[in-house]
């Protein structure tokens, strides 16, 4: 998603925050964050291919707010209804842009009907 965003905003700075959802607890786990010390942006766009439970998206938004981001917007291809509700409840000030919303999750926290795990698809990792 970053390459496409940079075509729209070629002067944008790109920061990476690494989070994944623990497959057993379904809770977010941060494994990488290297934000600059000084906030020099007006808006931060969080790019996330799929938002299933909303946990990692919410944790990422919270981290960016703590860092001092003045405005955060979420951009995703697919989200569950549960995730959208969670983000609206926990971050009512954040605009959410999503292409499609699927109605539910399975017992493992995957979107139904969904597209499978985005990270597994992107990095060819086992399920």
Image (cartoon, rainbow, N blue to C red):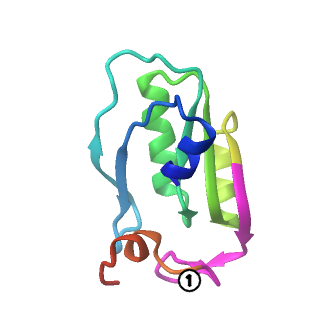
Residue 113 within the segment the image draws in magenta: yes
Residue depicted at 54% across the width and 42% down the height? 6
Residue 122 image-quadrant placement: bottom left
Residue depicted at 66% across the width and 77% down the height? 104
In this rendering, the answer to whether 78 lies above or below 5 is below
Query: What is the tally of numbered marks visible in this picture?
Result: 1
In this rendering, the answer to whether 44 lies above or below 37 is below
Q: Is residue 45 toward the left or the right of residue 23 in the image? A: right
Residue 103 within the segment the image draws in magenta: yes
In this rendering, the answer to whether 63 lies above or below 98 is above
Residue depicted at 33% across the width and 24% down the height? 36
The segment highlighted magenta reads 97-114
Residue 44 image-quadrant placement: top right
Q: Which residue is mark 1?
A: 106
Badge 1: how crowded within 10 Å, few (<14), some, or many (20+)?
Answer: few
Q: Is residue 117 toward the left or the right of residue 44 in the image? A: left
Q: Is residue 33 toward the left or the right of residue 3 in the image? A: left
């Amino acid at each position: 998603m970053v390459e496409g965003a940079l075509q729209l905003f070629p002067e944008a700075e790109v920061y990476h925050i690494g989070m994944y959802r623990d497959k057993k607890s379904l809770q977010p786990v941060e494994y990488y964050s290297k934000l600059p010390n000084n906030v020099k942006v007006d808006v931060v766009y969080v790019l996330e291919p799929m938002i299933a439970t909303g946990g990692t998206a919410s944790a990422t938004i919270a981290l960016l707010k703590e860092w001092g981001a003045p405005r955060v917007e979420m951009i995703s291809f697919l989200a569950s209804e549960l995730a959208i509700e969670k983000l609206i409840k926990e971050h009512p000030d954040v605009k959410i842009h999503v292409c499609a919303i699927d109605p539910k999750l399975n017992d493992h926290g995957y979107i139904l009907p969904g597209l499978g795990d985005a990270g597994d698809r992107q990095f060819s990792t086992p399920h």
